[in-house]
Image (cartoon, rainbow, N blue to C red):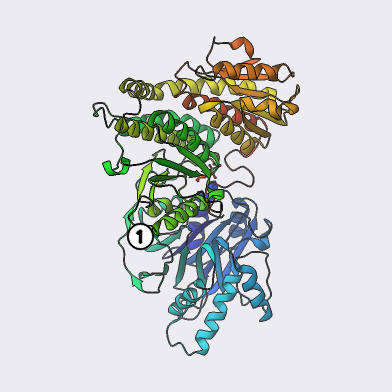
Amino acid sequence: MCGIVAVIGSREASPLLLEGLKRLEYRGYDSSGIATVEFPTDGSRGSLTCKRANGKLVNLVQLVNKEGAPGHLGIGHTRWATHGKPEERNAHPHRDSSGGIAVVQNGIIENHSVLRKELEVEGIQFLSDTDTEVIPHLIARELNLLTKDDFKTEKGLMLLEAVQRVSVQLEGAYAVAVIWEDAPETLVVARRQAPLLIGLGEGEFLCASDTPALAGFTRTILPMEDGEVALLTPLGIELYDIQGKRTQRSPTLLNGQEDVVNKRNFRHFMLKEIYEQSETARLWIDRHLPLGLPEDSPVAYPFKESFYEGIERIQILACGTSRHAGMVGAYLLEKFAGIPTTVFYASEFRYTKPPLTPNTLTIGVTQSGETADTLAALGMEAERRAQYGETAFISRQLGITNRSESSIARQVPNILDIGAGMEVGVAATKTFLGQLLAFYGLALAFAARRKSCSAQEIIDLTNELRSLPNQLIEQIEKHDQISETMAQHFVDTQNVIFLGRGINYPIALEGALKLKEISYIHAEGYPAGEMKHGPIALLERDVPVIAIATPGVVFEKVLSNAQEAKARDARLIGVAPDGVATETFDDLMPIPEVSEFISPLYSVIPMQLLSYHIAANRGLDIDQPRNLAKSVTVE
Ligand code: F6R
């Protein structure tokens, strides 16, 4: 999704802006741009240069190398189209009619059409279809008024005042960075419900929408709070809260995970991250399942005892892959802890609120910690419960994320950091495994306290989790090879069906989502028993069926559903233990014979690797699939 980088300091801004944008590429984008202001040497006004390019960042780099963008002050942006097609004229920065004010924005200005009409009546001509373009025009209007009002102050403070006045006119969620050639020593930034962080570098101040863009330049950061506006000059930072009052806060240090990532010897980040899953599991087990914990508290999670007490229901809010992790989580929480658990699409929950239930824990799952739908759903839930005060309806919330510095960590009181390390590939893989592990831990932690299952069941599950890291290494290497060969059968494939049941139904959904995302093949996941109620009509020789069949309560059922597919000539690929009913399948992707409860942690591996190799075979842009973004910060 869109990314912002901005800088004011002692060195040339454009190389730094381009480097920062490069580090945000993984978020997904379709055009990019920068604007810089050259400091005048004689104290006069500066001059603003703006360069924008459609497509990949390399196009912008070439343009800037050729035509130059001088100055020590600058803003940069990668755009993921929402309002207006991916074209150069819609790329940020956008400028006012004089061309002297430039703005980059992440988010959506919901009242942009009203504002645009108002400005058009005043004679402003718009050059783009974006919602953002209203902002530079509104700032210009406020600067005009300030000049007329004889607002006797220096230009930097005028820009600050103008941005503060415009902020209250905007509706929606946004982060903005603004420069003005008349104030060549001033960068003004503001945020509302969209992330923005200030970085304190050596001889420079930076600002970015995401930590990787800052990590190469500084480790000292100041995350902006909701509604804040900041004035950055070569001399320092001034922070203003939502009421416009000056405020102060100490910066914090980045925790080390946000370093710019490198592909090592892997062809793609996605493949590297699939391989890193055994390390994700090892770190999680070292941290949360150390030996020697008491029987009634077998998981080392950072919560007080009161967190676990009195919970009667759980609701999980998430999107995409994180929702699939939540579905496995719900299965575990119900099975082991006996807590009724419901999973919602976060985007639906906001507008289709279920009736309030007492003593309910709401869990938001988001690897990025920035997904607008998930944050808004959590916010809405906290708000509607707040009116009940200290009663059974009070809001109890937990966030499961991979980004402990993200917005969710500032929004909800309890956070589980899955600690999977930076994930660059847009398709979530190791963060999915991390989310699953977080739920295994929660289910065990609740179950042990509630004595809702036997001590032996807890020991068995814990032991299976402990053997995960070593087994995963073997599995990943094996499936990397098997999938590479099997992907040859998918050269002309247009449709694929994934089947699973019980705890592996969400893994069938995840398999289909991964395939769609990176290979652009149409794929659907179904609970295997549902196939005969409709999807079976799609089956023919060219529609492969991938069935997850792991020993357990639904094993035989899945096998007979798979037979139904085979009888319709579909090529049948089994994700199942070797030697157990393998004659059912045309091809086998063997996984270890583990308990059904632990099996999703293994069955997901062939799903990820098969999707990866099918997309790699087709020569697609695996790490940045078309139209997708790593963190979806708009509704
Ligand atoms: C799938 C994928 C998306 C995300 C979804 C939610 O590979 O990456 O479906 O899972 O956009 O993102 P987060 O987890 O950041 O809330």
Q: Can residue 46 be seen in this view?
A: yes
Q: Which of 455 and 15 is in front in this view?
A: 455
The spot of residue 391 in percent (x, y) is: 34, 53
**Residue 266: x %, y % from top left:** 52, 32
Is the C-beta of the residue carrying label 1 under 8 Å from the nearest atom of ligand 1?
no
Q: Residue at x 34, y 24 (%)?
A: 458
Quarter of image, res 582: top right
- Count numbered badges in the picture: 1
Q: Residues within 10 Å of mark 1 (few under 14, many from 20)?
A: few
Picture layout, residue 548 above or below residue 582: below
- Quarter containing the C terminus: bottom right
Residue at the spot 50% in from the left edge and 27% down from the top edge: 503
Residue at the disc numbered 1 = 202
The residue located at (48%, 29%) in the rendering is 275
Say left or right for 464 vs 72.
left
SS at circle 1:
loop
Q: Is 117 situated above or below 469?
A: below
Indicate whether 246 appears above or below 258: below
Q: Is residue 286 left or right of residue 162?
A: left
Q: Is residue 265 visible?
A: no
Three-letter code for the amino acid on which mark 1 is drawn: Glu
Q: Position of residue 634 (x, y in %)?
A: 56, 55
Residue 588, x across and y down, in percent: 60, 16
Describe residue 237's horizontal placement relative to residue 61 as left or right: left
| Viewer-closest of 320 and 2 | 320
Q: Which of 253 and 21 is in front in this view?
A: 253
323 horizontally vs 85: left or right = left
